[in-house]
Image (tube, rainbow, N blue to C red):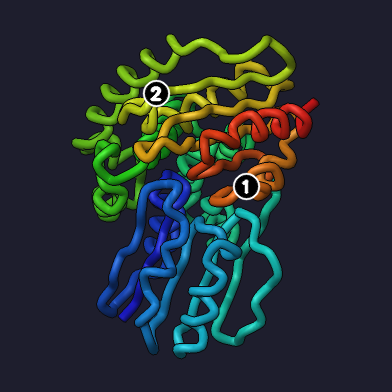
Amino acid sequence: MHYDIFNGDADGIFSLHQYRLHNPLSEERCLLTGVKRDICLLSQLENVHNCSLDVFDISLDSNRTALQKLLQQNNGVTYFDHHFAGAPINSPALQTHIDTNPAMCTSLIVNRVLHNHHGLWAICGAFGDNLHEPAMELAKTFRLSEQQIGSLRQLGELFNYNGYGLTFEDLLFHPRDLYEAIEPYSDPFEYLENSSQVGTLQAAYQADIALAMQEKEVGKPGKNRVYHLPDAPWARRIVGVLSNLRARERTTAAHAIITENQDGSLRISIRAPFADQRHADTLCKLYPSGGGRAAAAGINSLPKDMLDHFLNTFHSFYS
């Protein structure tokens, strides 16, 4: 048995798709994914023995214990990621392709390994991860028109938008269904011509972003900006897009987007200043359930009574 494990956002989906286009399987396969913030996916495979696994776009450090157990159970693992990884694991059964450079995402890592054989999908993944400049640089190698680049950007951003939510019920499509929708296509433009998902995503995106743009900045005006969204499916879906949009809108500011979980805790999405993409992961790791990468990170469940402490720390990090 083979397992493909991937983050449910654009980067995870397009990373897997590139790799599987280049390395088709003849054996039986199981797909495992989750909402974007559901990154401890390997813990769901604790009883797997003597199998092969390819992992895309989830932090090795967050899956360290489960990964070590899988390696001890005679599984072979290939790991692609750009998040904080922690100390390396030395095992002949583990092959890693990890690059935490802020200008890198997992789709670009896979593209590098595959020597640009399916780079159009990597462009989608980079746009989805808000890496517009690397996406544009890669697009130049394909001599794409502005319209074509715009189409790939839209595809990446819409798939990324779909990944945000507390549960699958918040999403427009299960991430596995989006992967299976693009699976037959080697050309993203052909998929766009035939897609039944993109129109649905675009309509929902427009409705959600219209609501989000009505939300006012909270707190005293300063160098950084904080927004607090309500406990609603539209807010949980749009938080990543809003974070990226606000970060590009004011590139010298750090941004924190707060949404409410149904248990009363808070979910935080952080973007480091676009002009200085550092420390977001370091900041979030100070709190339970925090993680991410230097440019963009988050906290899944912050107790409400810790909010003031978090905001003070946030502003001190980016003073």
Q: Amino acid at mark 1?
A: Tyr
Residue at the image point whose x is 78% and y is 30% from the top = 316
Please state if 198 lies on the left or on the right of 222 as rendered. Answer: left
Residues tagged 1 and 2 counted as in contact (Cβ below 8 A): no
Please state if 81 lies on the left or on the right of 174 as rendered. Answer: right
Residue to which mark 1 is pinned: 287
Please state if 301 lies on the left or on the right of 209 as rendered. Answer: right
> Residue 32's x, y, as percent?
33, 63
From the image, which quarter does the N terminus lie in?
bottom left
> Residue 196's x, y, as percent?
19, 36
Residue 95 in the image: above or below residue 314: below
Q: Nearer the viewer, residue 311 or 151?
A: 311
Tell me the element at label 1. Answer: loop
Q: Is residue 121 visible?
A: no
The quadrant holding residue 299 is: top right
Residue at the image point whose x is 60% and y is 57% from the top = 112
Which residue reaches farthest front? 305
> Residue 203's x, y, as percent?
26, 22
Residue at the image point whose x is 42% and y is 44% from the top = 10
Tell me the element at label 2. Answer: loop
Residue to which mark 2 is pinned: 230
Residue at the image point whose x is 53% and y is 41% from the top = 302
Residue 25 in the image: above or below residue 100: below
Residue 263 in the image: above or below residue 5: above
Q: Amino acid at mark 2?
A: Pro
From the image, which quarter does the C terminus lie in?
top right
Q: Is residue 299 visible?
A: yes
Are there few (<14), some (14-19), or many (20+) residues within 10 Å of tag 2? some
